[in-house]
């Protein structure tokens, strides 16, 4: 099969957002943005010719790579109900600080052709700087993978769980649905489809990446996977098993583990045999090793090239359209149902309270504006009619930001959210430094706050298909 190395443009710029399906209410009032014109931030000078663009960006990329190397963030994912936010915080494409800036007023426009060309040129420059170490084999032509589909329907899905909130006066209440950006495969969703619908790994992959097809690269004996562009000294099976173990642990359904292995391997191949944002975890259990070995070398293709197989912990009822969360409209990253989330995903309906004083501090510190004295006007989200994902947030009528860029400083699990404000007594707070500094701090704080009791409760929620029985509810019944 002839390989076509097509340009993979900016499929995952960190500026996107999520929101709860059907939640159309907004706090305060503002003119709704044009849904067909996503927010964009200024990029560097336009370069008309590709060669000039690459030369102009090389120095910047070297600086950015050095800064990234200095960061010491341990991305950790464990078992089904103990996810952190790592998959919602990685950047799947080259992202400059300018691209993450907010957009003032209502001046939102799509990226121009020149801006898009520059971003593509930057990606090419980075790839030239860090070439693949894989040895080319004469027998390494991809071949088709035999289909192994269950043909089973989704089946009966229980109703969504009820979500209750009890805010105090002066509080903002966020209800988040899922964990992560929601584009591509939901890891919890994959496990639920395998567990309750009896789907195979191929059923899962073709569901979350519609229009793709499976091939075997036949190159795993000759390839060398790099981590942050440095050789790992491990075989493809070894490094892939450690990555899959880090992503989903060893307690998910076997077919879901296999689906994760294919998605992770495809992502590595898309990035020139480099793990990029993915990180390994030592000593994977034998079930993970076996699952990876069973699908070793299998990757998803689209238009005769590796697909950009994004994934996140869970997507809160449906996956997101890529263009609603990031910038590019990727044909195989379109919204699809994630049917079982509402009934069994432990991250469906997480309630977070933030006081008005804390909210003012976070917004002003992060976005550099001075808020008005009316908290009910501070946050005005706008939602996609198709998916319910937030496309933009208007802050106090002063500026527009993409919801994903807004959700991070809020310290909430997912930018797929509802938000309300409960009026009450409010006094001007003293402006102090916020507790968070970046995404890594939020992840660390969340993990440290976990208790064994909370983890056990999440496990019970996932395992029980009809009713969650806790010690608290038993006591209430007895009384």
Image: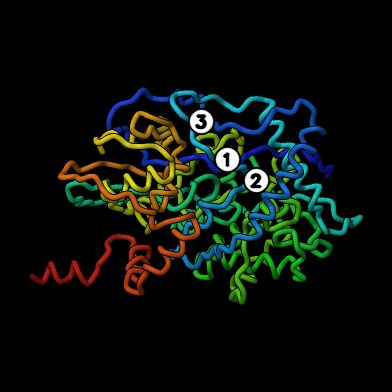
Q: Is residue 344 left or right of residue 338?
A: left
Disc 2 packing (10 Å; few <14; some 14–19; many ≥20): many
Secondary structure at numbered mark 3: loop
Secondary structure at numbered mark 2: loop
Q: Quadrant of residue 257?
A: bottom right
On-image quarter of the N terminus: top right
x, y percent for residue 241: 64, 68
Disc 1 packing (10 Å; few <14; some 14–19; many ≥20): many
Front residue of 49 and 292: 49
The residue shown at (30%, 33%) is 26
The residue shown at (53%, 70%) is 250
On-image quarter of the C terminus: bottom left
Residue underneath mark 1? 333
x, y percent for residue 88: 51, 51
Front residue of 251 and 283: 283
Q: Are marks 2 and 1 in contact (CB under 8 Å)?
A: yes
Residue 210 visible (yes or no): no
Q: Which mark is residue 39?
A: 3
Q: Which is in the foreground here, disc 3 or disc 1?
A: 3
């Amino acid at each position: 099969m002839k390989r076509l190395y097509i340009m993979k443009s900016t499929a995952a710029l960190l500026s996107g957002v999520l929101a709860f399906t059907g939640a159309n209410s907004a706090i305060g009032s503002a003119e709704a943005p044009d849904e067909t014109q996503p927010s964009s931030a200024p990029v560097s000078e336009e370069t008309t010719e590709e060669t000039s663009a690459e030369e102009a960006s090389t120095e910047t990329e070297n600086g950015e790579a050095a800064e990234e190397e200095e960061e010491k963030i341990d991305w950790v994912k464990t078992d089904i109900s103990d996810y952190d936010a790592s998959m919602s915080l990685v950047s799947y494409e080259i992202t400059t600080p300018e691209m993450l800036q907010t957009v003032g007023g209502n001046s939102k426009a799509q990226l121009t052709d020149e801006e898009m060309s520059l971003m593509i040129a930057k990606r090419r420059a980075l790839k030239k700087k860090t070439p693949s170490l894989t040895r080319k084999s004469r027998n390494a032509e991809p071949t088709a993978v035999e289909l192994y589909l269950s043909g089973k329907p989704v089946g009966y899905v229980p109703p969504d769980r009820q979500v209750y909130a009890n805010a105090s006066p002066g509080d903002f209440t966020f209800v988040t649905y899922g964990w992560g950006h929601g584009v591509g495969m939901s890891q919890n969703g994959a496990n639920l489809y395998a567990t309750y619908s009896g789907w195979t790994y191929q059923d899962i992959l073709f569901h979350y990446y519609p229009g793709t097809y499976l091939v075997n690269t036949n190159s795993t004996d000759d390839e060398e996977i790099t981590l942050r562009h440095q050789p790992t000294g491990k075989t493809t099976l070894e490094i892939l098993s450690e990555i899959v173990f880090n992503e989903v642990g060893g307690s998910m359904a076997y077919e879901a583990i296999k689906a994760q292995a294919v998605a992770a391997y495809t992502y590595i191949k898309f990035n020139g045999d480099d793990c990029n944002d993915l990180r390994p975890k030592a000593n994977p259990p034998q079930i993970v090793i076996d699952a990876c070995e069973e699908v070793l070398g299998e990757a998803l293709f689209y238009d005769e090239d590796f697909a950009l197989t994004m994934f996140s912990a869970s997507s809160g009822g449906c996956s997101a359209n890529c263009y609603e969360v990031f910038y590019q409209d990727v044909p195989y990253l379109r919204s699809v149902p994630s049917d079982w989330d509402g009934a069994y995903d432990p991250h469906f309906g997480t309630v977070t309270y933030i006081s008005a004083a804390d909210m003012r501090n976070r917004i002003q510190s992060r976005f550099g504006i001075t808020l008005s004295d009316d908290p009910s006007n501070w946050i005005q989200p706008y939602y996609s009619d198709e998916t319910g994902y937030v496309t933009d947030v208007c802050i106090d009528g002063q500026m527009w930001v993409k919801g994903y860029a807004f959700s991070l400083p809020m310290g909430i699990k997912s930018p797929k959210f509802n938000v309300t404000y409960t009026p009450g007594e409010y006094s001007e707070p003293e402006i102090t430094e916020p507790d968070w500094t970046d995404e890594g701090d939020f992840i660390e704080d969340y993990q440290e706050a976990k208790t064994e009791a909370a983890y056990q409760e999440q496990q019970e929620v996932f395992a029980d298909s009809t009713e969650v029985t806790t010690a608290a509810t038993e006591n209430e019944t007895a009384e």
